[in-house]
Amino acid sequence: MANNATILRAKLTKNVELGKEYFVSWFKAKDIVDKIEPGQFVMMESGQYLLRPFSVFGINNDDIGFLYRVVGWGTGFLSKLQIGDEVTIHGPLGKTFVFPKDKKRKIVIVAGGIGVATFPLVAQKAHELGYTVLSLFGARSINDLVAAEELKKYGELQIITDDGSSGRKGFVTELLEEELKKNKQCEIFVCGPTPMLKSVIKVCHSHDVTAQVSFEEFMACGYGVCMSCVIMTTSGKYIRTCVEGPVIKSDLVNA
C-alpha cells in the first residue's frame, strides 16, 4: 500500500451528467480529501473484480469528485449508482504535479480529451497559490469539452477541436507550439490519451523544455505490485506509472 493512502467505503452524494456520456460522481471521503494533492489518483470499485484508476476532478468540503466518460461496464456502473450507494476507494496514490518555486512562472495546462479530469483541481490550487494559469484544451468536438467552464474560473482558456466545432480546428499541440514560441519560461502540465502525450513530448523536446506529464495507463493494483502500468524510460528501464508516476518529467520518457 502506498504511504499515506487509505482504503474506505465511500457513499455517493451526487451524480451529475455534464453532457452525453460524461458524468461527475461525488463521494463522501473525508480521509482521502484531507490528503489528496493535485495530480494524484485513486483506485475505485466500479462493479468489477479489480479497482480502476480515476483522477480527482474536484473537492467540495468532505466530498471528492471524479469525472469520467461512459465507455464500458465499469463507468456505466458508476453512472447508474444511486445516492447513498457505497463503493471502495483506495487513495490518494501516485506522484503529484510540482509547482515551481518562482510564482512568476506561468502554469500552462495541456489537456486532451478526458485527460482534462485531473486539471480543475490543479488549476484551482495554482490560482490559489498566486500563479498565472493558461489552459490549452483539445477535444474531438464541442460535445467533448467537459470541464471547460471549470478551467475558465482560474485563468485563460484556449480551445481547439478536431472538427472545428468549437475554437480552432486542429490539435492541442498547435496551441502549445505557439505558446512556447512566445514564452519558454513556463511550467507545462500535461494529461491526455497516449498519442497526444507523445506528440506533446516531441514538441517539448524540439523547444528544449521539460513538461510534467501525467500518464493514463491501465492499472490493476495502483501501488506498484502488478507491473501492468509500466512504461519505458529514455535509459531503457521500465518505471511504474502508479508509483514513480503518474506525473513524470517528459525528458525521462520516449516520445
Image (tube, rainbow, N blue to C red):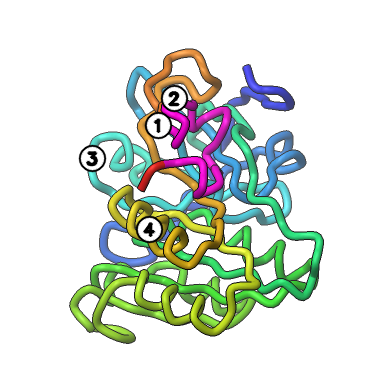
- Neighbor class of circle 1 (other Cα within 10 Å; few <14, some 14-19, many 20+) is some
- Neighbor class of circle 2 (other Cα within 10 Å; few <14, some 14-19, many 20+) is some
Residue where numbered disc 2 is placed: 238
- Neighbor class of circle 4 (other Cα within 10 Å; few <14, some 14-19, many 20+) is some
Residue where numbered disc 4 is placed: 202
Q: Residue furthest top?
A: 225
Closer to the camera in the image, 242 or 184: 184
Q: From mark 1 to mark 2, how far is it between C-alphas?
A: 5 Å
Q: Which mark is residue 72?
A: 3
Q: Are marks 3 and 1 in contact (CB under 8 Å)?
A: no
Mark 3 element type: loop
Closer to the camera in the image, 15 or 194: 194
Q: Is residue 241 magenta?
A: yes
Q: From mark 2 to mark 4, how far is it between C-alphas?
A: 20 Å
Q: Earlier in the sequence, mark 1 or mark 2?
A: 1
In this picture, which residue range is highlighted in magenta?
233-253
Q: Earlier in the sequence, mark 4 or mark 3?
A: 3
Q: Earlier in the sequence, mark 3 or mark 1?
A: 3
Q: From mark 2 to mark 3, how far is it between C-alphas?
A: 29 Å
